[in-house]
Image (tube, helix red, strand yellow):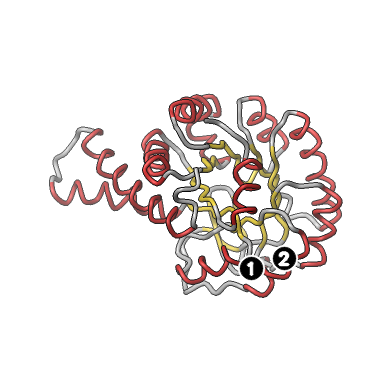
């Protein structure tokens, strides 16, 4: 069943758990995520980046996810991750996305509030939920690239003003995670998270969670994180699945025998994340 992020995250906020948001680029990744959600009886957020849309096409991705959601017995939402242009966001709204993210984090606070409010007005009129970001995560993922010197943690006071003036449905904050693969061991600012959650009282989003320690994730969920983004860990699982096939049979040429094991590998990774986040059994 296809729903909005707001429906999924409001329930997670009330229930004290987080829901995994997994980036997909093709059919096999989507099948792995949906199969994991079915087996774990978990709600799930299917995310597409601007890079995924450029790679596969908005119409293809929409058709795939709508079919998967129609067949699924768990709540599924289709979310645009890191929407940076008006054109991309409107394209997603027109093609059946049920949630969009407007990433104005590279703007000063005033401008971020302005561009976010404009998108919220359009999306809410169409019954679509909106995520925004305040603070900047370092690292690289698809078309998002932020140098470490430009990364900054979310200011709690700015978060209050931002939420009050925009009416955003969920807020992505910067508390120590980063996009892509980590060079070291990430340490989250749980005190900052706790302060922000108590002040804004809406679902909080954690980006760049691939590679973050389980204890860090568990504590973050207890302190109010309700959506956790996973991309890199799934990509790594896909790659390891493909490499295992060729290690066993270097001459394999059947795409089904190459992608099938990768799909199975991804499914197990996603299931483990759902159990860690506390969303298993919450469908």
Figure quadrant of residue 118: top right
Numbered tag placed on residue 175 in the rendering = 1
- The residue lying at 30 percent from left, 49 percent from top is 265
Q: Position of residue 281 (x, y in %)?
A: 45, 48
Left or right of residue 275, residue 136 in this image: right
Q: Position of residue 166 (x, y in %)?
A: 82, 48
SS class of the residue under badge 1? loop
- The residue lying at 68 percent from left, 69 percent from top is 194
Left or right of residue 134, residue 118 in this image: right
Left or right of residue 91, residue 199 in this image: right
Residue 120 versus residue 51: which sits nearer the camera?
A: 120
> Earlier along the polypeptide chain: callout 2 or callout 1?
2
Vertical placement of 155 versus 232: above or below? Answer: below
Vertical placement of 8 versus 16: above or below? Answer: above
Residue 110 versus residue 159: which sits nearer the camera?
A: 159
Q: Position of residue 6 (x, y in %)?
A: 66, 42
Q: Position of residue 235 (x, y in %)?
A: 40, 50
Residue 82 versus residue 223: which sits nearer the camera?
A: 223
Q: How many marks?
A: 2
Neighbourhood count class around disc 1 (C-alpha, 10 Å): few under 14, some 14–19, many 20 upward: many
Residue 52 versus residue 210: which sits nearer the camera?
A: 210
Vertical placement of 70 versus 190: above or below? Answer: above
Q: Tell me the CA gap for discs 2 and 1.
A: 7 Å
- The residue lying at 27 percent from left, 49 percent from top is 241
Residue beneath label 2, please?
154
Vertical placement of 73 versus 189: above or below? Answer: above
Figure quadrant of residue 4: top right
Numbered tag placed on residue 187 in the rendering = none
User: Residues at badges 2 and 1 in contact (C-beta under 8 Å)?
Assistant: yes
Left or right of residue 84, residue 114 in this image: right
SS class of the residue under badge 2? loop
């Amino acid at each position: 069943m296809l729903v909005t992020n707001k429906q999924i995250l409001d329930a997670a906020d009330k229930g004290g758990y987080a829901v995994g948001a997994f980036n997909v680029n093709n059919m096999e990744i989507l099948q792995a995520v949906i199969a994991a959600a079915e087996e774990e009886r978990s709600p799930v957020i299917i995310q597409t980046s601007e890079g995924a849309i450029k790679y596969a096409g908005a119409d293809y991705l929409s058709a795939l996810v709508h079919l998967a959601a129609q067949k699924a017995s768990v709540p599924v939402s289709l979310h645009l991750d890191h929407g940076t242009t008006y054109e991309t966001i409107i394209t997603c709204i027109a093609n059946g996305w049920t949630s969009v993210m407007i990433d104005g984090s590279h703007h000063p606070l005033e401008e971020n509030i302005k561009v976010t409010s404009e998108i919220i007005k359009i999306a809410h009129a169409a019954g679509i939920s909106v995520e925004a970001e305040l603070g900047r995560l370092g690292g690289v993922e698809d078309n998002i690239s932020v140098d470490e010197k430009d990364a900054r943690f979310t200011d709690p006071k700015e978060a209050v003003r931002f939420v009050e003036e925009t009416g955003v449905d969920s807020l992505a904050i910067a508390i120590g995670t980063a996009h892509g693969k980590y060079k070291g061991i990430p340490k989250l600012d749980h005190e900052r998270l706790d302060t922000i959650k108590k002040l804004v009282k809406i679902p909080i989003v954690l980006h760049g969670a691939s590679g973050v320690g389980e204890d860090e994730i568990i504590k973050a969920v207890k302190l109010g994180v309700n959506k956790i983004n996973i991309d890199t860990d799934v990509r790594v699982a896909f790659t390891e699945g493909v490499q295992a096939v060729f290690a066993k049979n270097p001459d394999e040429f059947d795409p089904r025998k190459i992608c099938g094991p990768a799909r199975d590998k991804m499914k197990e990774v996603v299931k483990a994340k759902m159990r860690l986040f506390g969303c298993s059994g919450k469908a």
